[in-house]
Image (cartoon, grey):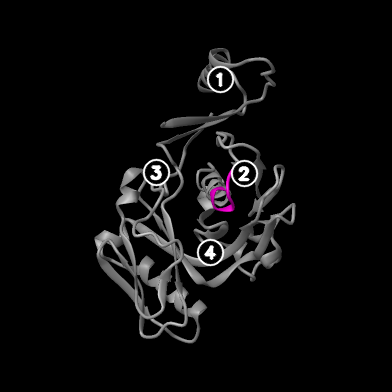
Amino acid sequence: MAHTVIHLTHDRTTNQRGRRGRELLRVAVNKALGCIAGAEVASNFTVVGSGTDPAAACTCGISASGAGAVGMVINGVTITATWATSDTVSAGLVATAIRASTNALVQYNVSSTNFHAQVTLASVLAGTVITVGGFRFTAIAGTTESNVPGEFVIGGTDTADGASFCRALNQHPSASKWFFALNVAGVVHLFVKNPANAYFTAATANGPNFPQNRVTASLATVTVDQATFVASAYYGVWALVPGKLGNCITVAASGTNQSIENTNTRLTRGLGGDATPVTDNL
């Protein structure tokens, strides 16, 4: 079912205890009207619209001991770089080639990066907190996903839990502007959309220890395989196009020992893409 999430920030405390259904909706609408009318001082609201699955379309490739031209075929267009020096260097070259493409089938549809961190989920317990770049994601028991930003469910297998965590990050109204994630059987690959930002470079005073460049987990059932975002042998590709168009983008590996980690032939979870939520500051 499609849904719209409205986030409100206002200067007056409202007791929601006991309110449910239509009554709670009425309170939210009244608060929104108050924001629009200026009755709430220093207020703002964010509206995030989505379809069935608003997570960003993404896939993950890896240059594994390649040779010659390695890369991807995106929307039928072959984008490659010449494997050189190491898998990490080569993955960076492929990501750069994807970003630099001037072919309309690629240039306006996808982007790529190999700035990567990684966690592995194994029988995650409720209450476990995974922090990505300062954004907290809390595991909750059950099989029905919450509409609360920053919550993911752990009612299934590690693969299902990893997918839920990825959806929570990819549809988060703030975290998704910085990061995207994809799941490979409980191993979650995390990527920075703009690694050139000073938060993610060692040249800053705080360097890689700055919170925006850290991934942590509160319990050992989540193993932090790579705690800082660094150049890696993995490169992620995500859709710049919101909506179902993101799901129409085809991908395939190209070149010696080149593979797609999540084995997808299309960018998955395209609803949401790289669209920025609508925010009004009143």
Observer-side mark, 3 or 2, equals: 2
Task: Say if mark 4 contacts mark 1, CB within 8 Å.
Answer: no
Q: Which of the two discs, 2 and 1, labels the residue nearer the N terminus?
A: 1
Q: Which of the two discs, 3 and 2, labels the residue nearer the N terminus?
A: 2
Asked if the stretch drawn in magenta spans residue 62, the answer is no
Q: Pointer 2: what residue?
A: 154
Q: Pointer 4: what residue?
A: 195
Secondary structure under tag 1 reads helix
Magenta stretch, residue numbers: 154-160
Q: Quadrant of residue 21?
A: top right
- Residue at left offset 50%, top offset 69%: 234
Q: What amino acid is at disc 3? A: Leu
Q: What amino acid is at disc 4? A: Pro
Asked if the stretch drawn in magenta spans residue 156, the answer is yes
Observer-side mark, 1 or 3, equals: 3
In this image, 176 relative to 225: left or right? left
* Residue 31 coordinates in the image, percent (x, y): 57, 19
Q: Which of the two discs, 4 and 3, labels the residue nearer the N terminus?
A: 4
Q: Which of the two discs, 2 and 4, labels the residue nearer the N terminus?
A: 2
Secondary structure under tag 4 reads loop
Label 3 and label 2: CA atoms lie apart by 22 Å
In this image, 211 relative to 257: left or right? right
- Front residue (pair 50, 47): 50
Task: Say if mark 1 contacts mark 3, CB within 8 Å.
Answer: no
Q: Which of the two discs, 1 and 3, labels the residue nearer the N terminus?
A: 1
Q: Which of the two discs, 4 and 1, labels the residue nearer the N terminus?
A: 1
Q: Residue furthest front?
A: 157
- Residue at left offset 56%, top offset 58%: 188
Q: Which mark is residue 28?
A: 1
Neighbour class for label 1 at 10 Å: few (<14), some, many (≥20)? some
Image: 35 above or below 216? above
Task: Say if mark 2 contacts mark 4, CB within 8 Å.
Answer: no
